[in-house]
Image: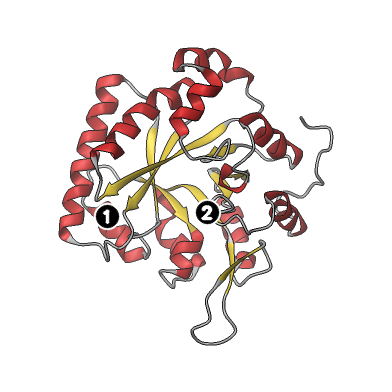
């Protein structure tokens, strides 16, 4: 499979350091969110490459493909800053041969999917598709199941009002933990729309009311043992990316520990490559 990780898990590394870590574990691609201690993606790209034109000349020499640029844009409940951010990132994605820009489904605390939300979805995709046509951009958005699209029913309603279904970034943890769905069942219902997958683990509290805590992959309660074989049987070719949220939760162990935990589960089946740089 196309294994990857999000740089949210190594937020203080440079881009080259993140590439080196991914190559050390023989991963197939890299998902870009945090770099140099922040999530100001456009500013980081300017600092690294200067301009999209300059980045285009360097794209073929990158150590690994970049599978996604992860924006903070929301489809539901957007602000003008959301649309401005997406317009600013699209030329960078094309220059670096990045197929996807991650956008969130909606802002937190907006509740369940409502008819007013669906109109915002229509408006967003009319605007985005027009911008793509106007500029000739190849990159497309992938919509993450993060705050509103937490159940199969919600995802199907979201897709039903679009002329062309949106590409989905399925956060397997959110539909399992927040949506209380079995990942295998969710996958069987939404698989044709899924272009990218996030995985992470969480340990549920031992007693009622006890909070859940993030856990190293395989050390929590997430049912990887059924999900991973399901993805393999489907021959899923999109990125399956470890989203280790160290940027938001600095108390978490280092990303390298999480990657070691993945290796112990034989996700990529080979030892770290100490010669990678």
Give how far across and how far down residue 67 sits, in percent: 53, 36
Determine the image quadrant of residue 239.
top right
Q: Is residue 97 visible?
A: no
Q: Is residue 49 visible?
A: yes
- Kindly give the residue lying farthest to the bottom in the view shown: 207
Dot 1 falls on a residue whose secondary structure is: helix
Identify the residue under disc 2. Answer: 248
Q: How is the image coloured?
A: secondary structure
- Residue 109 placement, left or right of 202: left
Between disc 2 and disc 1, the foreground one is: 2
Q: Residues within 10 Å of mark 2 (few under 14, many from 20)?
A: few
Determine the image quadrant of residue 146.
bottom left
For the residue pair 229 and 74, the one nearer the viewer reads as 74
Give how far across and how far down residue 151 sits, in percent: 37, 65
Q: Give the residue displayed 81% in from the left and 39% down from the top.
A: 273
Q: Give the residue displayed 39% in from the left and 22% down from the top.
A: 91
For the residue pair 127 and 258, the one nearer the viewer reads as 258
Alpha carbon distance from label 2 to label 1: 28 Å
């Amino acid at each position: 499979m196309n294994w990857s990780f999000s740089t949210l898990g190594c937020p203080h590394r440079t881009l080259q350091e993140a590439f080196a870590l991914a190559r050390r574990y023989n991963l197939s691609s890299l998902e870009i969110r945090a770099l140099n201690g922040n999530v100001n993606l456009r500013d980081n790209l300017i600092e690294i490459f200067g301009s999209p034109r300059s980045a285009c000349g360097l794209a073929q020499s990158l150590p690994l493909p970049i599978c996604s640029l992860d924006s903070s844009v929301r489809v539901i409940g957007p602000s003008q800053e959301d649309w401005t951010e997406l317009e600013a990132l699209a030329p960078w994605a094309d220059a670096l041969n990045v197929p996807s820009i991650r956008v969130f489904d909606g802002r937190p605390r907006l509740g369940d999917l409502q008819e007013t939300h669906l109109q915002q979805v229509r408006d967003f995709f009319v605007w985005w598709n027009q911008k793509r046509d106007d500029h000739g951009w190849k990159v497309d958005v992938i919509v993450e199941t993060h705050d509103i699209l937490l159940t199969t029913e919600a995802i199907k309603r979201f897709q039903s009002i679009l002329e062309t279904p949106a590409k989905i970034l399925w956060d397997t943890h959110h539909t399992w933990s927040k949506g209380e769905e079995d990942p295998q069942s969710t996958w069987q219902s939404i698989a044709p729309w899924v272009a990218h997958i996030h995985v992470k683990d969480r340990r549920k509290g031992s007693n009622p009311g006890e909070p859940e805590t993030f856990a190293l992959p395989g050390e929590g309660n997430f049912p990887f043992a059924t999900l991973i074989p399901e993805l393999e049987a489907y021959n899923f070719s999109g990125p399956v990316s470890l989203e280790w949220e160290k940027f938001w939760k600095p108390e978490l162990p280092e990303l390298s520990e999480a990657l070691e935990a993945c290796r112990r589960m034989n996700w990529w089946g080979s030892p770290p490559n100490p010669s990678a740089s």
